[in-house]
């Protein structure tokens, strides 16, 4: 019993020697109550981490004496920081990480660039109140730069692009900015991690980085928070074949999907949280080791778990529905087209023989026609092939369709295209191949980009040929 009591005292004493707070008398021989909120010591009593308290009065020579400190944080309101403090900080030879996010009501400006003399500093954090007090191009030893709550400017982006060792960049944008050119970032062969966080009104506003992602060739990690993404942006990101980790948090996808990211050959970790206006399915990359998805309530009906999804988390499976194995979000073809519905909006005519497409389909009075925005179908007599976008038919029309707008005669046995060609015979593939030579895939199968019929994401996803079969990729 006594042994356990002594053991507890010894453990408590050791713990206290590693971490000290503002209620203690000293840390590493320096009076805590005078200058800082937090202080971390090692087992030998040497200070390793130091965080100044607000409006700390740091006397001359204090920083110079802290030769063992590896991490220094100066935050909050600091009205007593002067130039000599940074002159001394530049002599702290053990310093590797420095956080300069404080604000001051004093008009006296200090030049923080002097800390460049300390070539051991590899991590630097700046805020909107300190970013203009340092010449970032002079900080050549920096490997990780975190700039939080700033109004990003083109000149700053250009200057960051000149840092020769920068490996990781994190940008926390406080206010909306005009279109920026990130060309200087893209030319950095050392930059492997990029995080962009738009902090203003996350729930309703996002920042548009349109066209900013094309050209990065060395990134292995990309994290975007509250960023507006278009289909083109997603395709640009899919061209960064070096990516291993992607995180989208509260991003708006502009009613596009993420199918093209399936092209990334090295993607291991994927996170999509709070996604807005997203459609389609989860990723199926064979390289994935971990993936998690959570979409905004308004997009839940248009985004589902793919049949061939990889490394899906338990939380995702509890929050999203499985995609329909037959239609995968789009209407399936039917041999006689009396009843074929899609996952979103199905409609029927007076006699109940019609199923409309996802967006805009039109049909005749007696309903022998079923059309789809992307997938072609045939009527009861096999005379119909729908358009890629909008099909139109007449009162008795047995035929509909060209690529955009087709017109037919009163009895509709002929369908002409935009160039008024005669109706060609529909050729159905019988050898598992598809295309102009082999024809359309049968039984609602997809025609892959290399001309083969099938139903998996390989056939129905990116590059799928919609003229010769069903496609799940917009």
Image: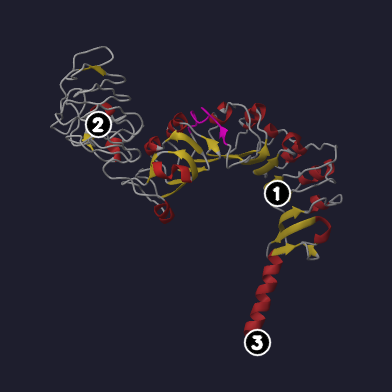
* First-in-chain label (3 vs 1): 3
* Rendered view: 35 above or below 468: below
The tag earlier along the polypeptide, 1 or 2, is 1
How dense is the environment of label 1, judged by Cα within 10 Å: few (below 14), some, or many (20 and up)? Answer: many
Q: 119 or 83: nearer the eye?
A: 83
Q: Quick check: is 209 in the magenta stretch?
A: yes
Q: Residue at x 80, y 53 (%)?
A: 65
Where does label 3 land, which residue? 2
At horizontal 27% and vertical 19% (from top left) the residue drawn is 406
Residue matched to label 1: 95
What sort of colour scheme is used for the picture?
A: secondary structure
Mark 1: secondary structure? loop
**What is the C-alpha distance between the residues marked 2 and 3?**
85 Å
Which residue matches tag 2? Answer: 370
Question: Can residue 282 be seen from the camera position used here?
Answer: no
| Residue contact at pointers 1 and 2, CB within 8 angstroms | no
Mark 3 Cα shell of 10 Å, populated few (<14), some (14-19), many (≥20)? few
What are the residue bounds of the magenta stretch? 206-217
Give residue 11's quadrant in the image.
bottom right
Q: Residue furthest front?
A: 350
Circle on res. 386:
none
**Which residue occupies 31% across, 41% down?**
328
Left/right of residue 452 with respect to residue 106 in the rendered view: left
Residue 384 against residue 459 in the figure, above or below: above
């Amino acid at each position: 019993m006594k042994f356990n009591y002594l053991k507890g005292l010894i453990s408590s004493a050791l713990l206290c020697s590693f971490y000290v707070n503002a209620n203690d008398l000293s840390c590493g021989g320096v009076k805590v109550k005078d200058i800082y909120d937090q202080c971390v010591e090692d087992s030998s009593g040497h200070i390793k981490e130091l965080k100044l308290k607000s409006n700390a009065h740091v006397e001359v020579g204090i920083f110079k004496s802290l030769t063992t400190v590896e991490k220094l944080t100066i935050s909050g309101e600091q009205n007593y920081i002067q130039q000599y403090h940074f002159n001394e900080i530049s002599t702290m030879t053990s310093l590797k990480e420095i956080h300069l996010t404080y604000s001051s009501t004093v008009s006296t400006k200090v030049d923080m660039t002097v800390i460049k003399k300390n070539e051991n500093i590899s991590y630097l954090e700046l805020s909107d109140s300190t970013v203009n007090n340092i010449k970032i191009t002079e900080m050549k030893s920096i490997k990780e730069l975190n700039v939080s709550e700033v109004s990003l400017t083109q000149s700053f982006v250009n200057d960051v692009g000149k840092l020769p060792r920068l490996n990781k960049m994190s940008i926390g944008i406080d206010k909306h900015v005009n279109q920026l050119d990130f060309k200087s970032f893209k030319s950095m062969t050392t930059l492997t991690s990029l995080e962009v966080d738009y902090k203003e009104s996350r729930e309703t506003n996002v920042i548009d980085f349109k066209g900013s992602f094309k050209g990065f060739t060395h990134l292995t990690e990309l994290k975007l928070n509250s960023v507006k993404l278009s289909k083109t942006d997603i395709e640009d990101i899919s061209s960064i074949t070096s990516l291993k980790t992607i995180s989208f948090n509260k991003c708006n996808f502009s009613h596009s999907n993420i199918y093209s990211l399936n092209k990334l050959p090295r993607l291991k970790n994927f996170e999509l949280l709070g996604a807005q206006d997203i459609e389609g399915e989860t990723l199926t990359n064979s390289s994935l080791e971990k993936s998690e998805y959570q979409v905004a309530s308004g997009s839940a009906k248009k985004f589902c778990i793919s049949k061939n999804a990889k490394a899906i988390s338990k939380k995702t499976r509890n929050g999203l529905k499985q995609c329909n194995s037959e239609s995968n979000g789009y209407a399936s073809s039917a041999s006689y087209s009396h009843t074929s519905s899609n996952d979103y909006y199905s409609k029927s005519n007076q006699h109940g023989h019609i199923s409309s497409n996802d967006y805009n389909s039109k049909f005749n009075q007696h309903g022998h026609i079923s059309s789809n925005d992307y997938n072609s179908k045939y009527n009861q007599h096999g005379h119909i092939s729908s358009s890629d976008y909008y099909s139109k038919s007449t009162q008795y029309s047995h035929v509909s369709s060209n690529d955009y707008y087709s017109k037919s005669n009163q009895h509709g046995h002929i369908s002409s295209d935009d160039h008024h060609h005669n109706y060609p015979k529909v050729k159905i593939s019988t050898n598992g191949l598809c295309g102009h030579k082999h024809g359309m895939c049968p039984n609602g199968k997809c025609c892959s980009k290399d001309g083969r019929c099938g139903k998996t994401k390989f056939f129905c996803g990116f590059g799928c040929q919609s003229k010769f079969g069903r496609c799940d990729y917009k």
